[in-house]
Amino acid sequence: MPQQFFPKVMGIVNVTPDSFSDGGLFINSKNAIDHAFKLIDDGADILDIGGESSRQNADEISIEEELQRVIPVIEGIRRINTSIEISIDTVKYEVAKAALDVGAGIINDISGLNHDKRLAALAAEYNAGLILMHIRGTPRTMQNDPHYTNVVQEVFDELNGKIAYAHSFDAKNVMADVGIGFGKTPEHNWTLLRNLSKFEKLGVPMVLGISRKSFLGKLLGIESPIERDAATALLHALLLKEKIDIIRVHSVQDITMLRKLWHELQ
């Protein structure tokens, strides 16, 4: 049965010099804040602010550098807009705490608590959302010959364990992300997308991040990430039959058009 609601749209704000898709465009705080408000105007329900690239082979940056990138952006958004949901895309406890202190309400942990398990207790303390993404390894190592015997079952089991751990700290708003492109081959990615319905049994809202990713480019022969927005929107349209609660994208306006079309057909 098709789901009866359209997912929330999370717009990506990469305050980084080296993200795979738009690295360097918004490293300046003013540019990042301007981009955030464009995403809001385009229809974003949530802003996901990140200061450290998670692309393949990305280098880790210091806590201090990450704070210098993301905190002024969150503060700048909050000075003008106090209602938009803000997510901090970080694996670091100190960055997450500082972001929550200035107005973020969700921690988006791409390490799924592998980097710092204290994020579970932090989310509980602040009554914040906590997105736990599946990944094997780190951004530097994740694509070094990823191997699964049964990718769907293994990703499910690993996420299930992390969710249980977060719940043990009384974190109440835990979400899961299967981690498309993170420690997975293109075939692993497609297998997970064909089997998203099986992750409903996790019992938590599902976040999906497929925007501009290389597995789309490989299938369709699109080398430039920014030219994969149409493919991103088309794949989201095909996946609307699944129970997805949040879709994380670079081009919010494409998904807003899809949302208008979807509502018209209901």
Image: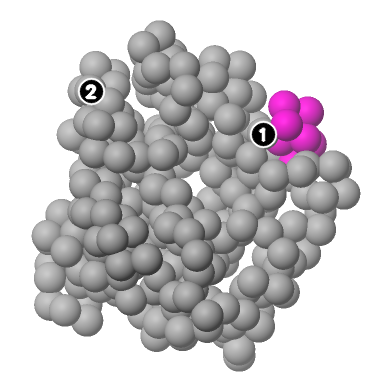
Q: Quadrant of the C terminus?
A: bottom left
Comparing 108 with 148, the one in front is 108
Distance of mark 2 from mark 1, alpha carbons?
Answer: 25 Å
| Residue 64 drawn above or below residue 229 | above
- Span of residues in magenta: 120-127
| Place of residue 203 in the rendered image (x, y in percent of width and height, measured from the top left) | 72, 64
The answer to whether residue 68 of the structure is visible from this angle is no
The amino acid marked with disc number 2 is Asp
| Place of residue 199 in the rendered image (x, y in percent of width and height, measured from the top left) | 62, 73
Taking the spot 73% from the left edge, 31% from the top edge, the residue there is 127
Taking the spot 78% from the left edge, 49% from the top edge, the residue there is 166
The amino acid marked with disc number 1 is Ala
SS of the residue at dot 2?
helix
Taking the spot 70% from the left edge, 44% from the top edge, the residue there is 173
SS of the residue at dot 1?
loop
Taking the spot 57% from the left edge, 83% from the top edge, the residue there is 151
Comparing 177 with 96, the one in front is 177
Residue picked out by circle 1: 128
- Was residue 86 drawn as part of the magenta stretch in this picture? no
Residue picked out by circle 2: 34
| Place of residue 38 in the rendered image (x, y in percent of width and height, measured from the top left) | 22, 31
Mark 2, Cα crowd under 10 Å, few <14 / some 14-19 / many 20+, is some
